[in-house]
Image (spheres, rainbow, N blue to C red):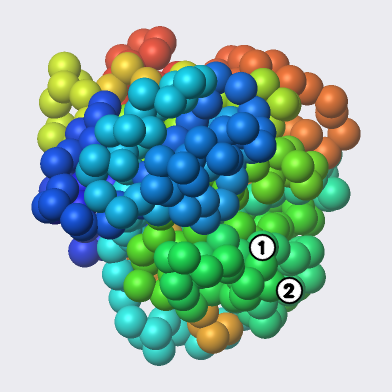
Amino acid sequence: MTIKLRVIADSLLILALVFSLGGFGGLATEAAGQPERVIVTFDHAVNESARIALENAGGKILKELPLVNGAVVLLPNEVAASNIGILAGVRSVEKDALVFALKPPSKGGGSTQPAEVLEWGVDRIDADLAWATSRGSGVNVAIIDTGIDKDHADLIGNLKGGVNFVSKSPVKPADPNKWDDDNGHGTHVAGIVAAADNEIGIIGTAPEANLWAVKVLDRNGSGYVSDVIDGINWAVDNGMQVVNMSLGSGSDVQALHDAVDAAYAAGVVLIAAAGNSGDGDGSTNEVIYPAKYSSVIAVAATASDDSTPTWSSEGEEVELAAPGVSIRSTWNDGLYNTISGTSMASPHVSGVVALILEDSVLSPTEVRAMLQATADDLGAEGHDNFYGYGLVDAE
């Protein structure tokens, strides 16, 4: 049975979401002879000796993951996996688990192009009051998601390009140019960050930031964890200053942990959805990965009355809160759609980070300190497990 890594593509329909959890500390037993795809990491860069050793153990190298000193390897069976685990220099062997985004509302369900509106979420975090000082001009924001609609009139002015890591075949390389969104979720997230101020539709939090589509999920919202790692690697190599990940899992994958830590050390600010599996009890912890990692800003959701919906994950890792209920944003085919979730909260924070970085050279640690100090403290005084340090405040 393949171990699955749930990726949250938030919508109004997932308030009672239950994750399919799997362990990633080791490899699950497979039926004899069943091929499996794994991530092998080394305590050194993958070199020729490592490649030969992997092949001699029966593995076919599909691609390398330089950010984590790893490689994605197709193995004939579990015996080969055991053999690889004892090779010299091998640090870990983990499933390259399937990742899934929940299917959002079907295409055509959104509204057509309206006159420009300042949506309640952007208004609530006072982004419009910050625009006299900064509009995020020139700041590179990577949307690691399902892609971005290449032709959307409200995004095209800020959309600078992208890359695709999704292949139609697990053993064939992806076409890097096919990063157009065929799902809708990534386009919705992108609009919250940086829809243009152009008299139509909506205005993003940072209406002049540069948007970059990093497609790691296919039209059905599925892909591999190695594709997410590839996306983070691309962001580091291509000068992204901000990475938004409106996706997550209930399972800890060490290779993904290593990837976000490496990006953080390289100066990238990483923001992720805290998750939609909350129970309303602040003493429990439902924060998902990668938001749960210390190098990533975990964002919870708020409603228009500043309450946190029960489904917004709580936990000590929650760092900030942002609007995430009934958020209208861009959608595929030039449309607009209203959905809810911490996936919508995260890009509000990513947009604010773009505002901060327009004329500033700050480390991720400095950016986080600024966000924490200026947040609108809601709930219990100081940091709490529902709002973190409070509602992000762009002004």
Can you say which quadrant of the picture contains the C terminus? top right
**What crowding class fits label 1: few (fewer than 14 Cα within 10 Å), some (14-19), or many (20 or more)?**
many
- Inspect the image, locate mark 1, and give the three-letter code of the amino acid beneath it: Val
The circle on residue 142 is none
Is residue 204 in view from this perspective?
no
Q: Which residue is mark 1?
A: 163
Is residue 156 in view from this perspective?
yes
Residue at the spot 40% in from the left edge and 89% down from the top edge: 108
- Residue 197 place in picture, x, y as percent: 74, 65
Task: Estimate the spatial distance between the alpha carbons at disc 2 and disc 1, rounded to whole Å.
Answer: 16 Å
Which is more foreground, mark 2 or mark 1? 1
Residue 222: quarter of image: bottom left
Residue 333: quarter of image: bottom right
Compared across the picture, whether 151 is left or right of 1 comes to right
Q: Earlier in the sequence, mark 2 or mark 1?
A: 2
Q: Which residue is mark 2?
A: 156
- Residue 296 place in picture, x, y as percent: 51, 28
Where 124 sits versus 287, above or below?
below
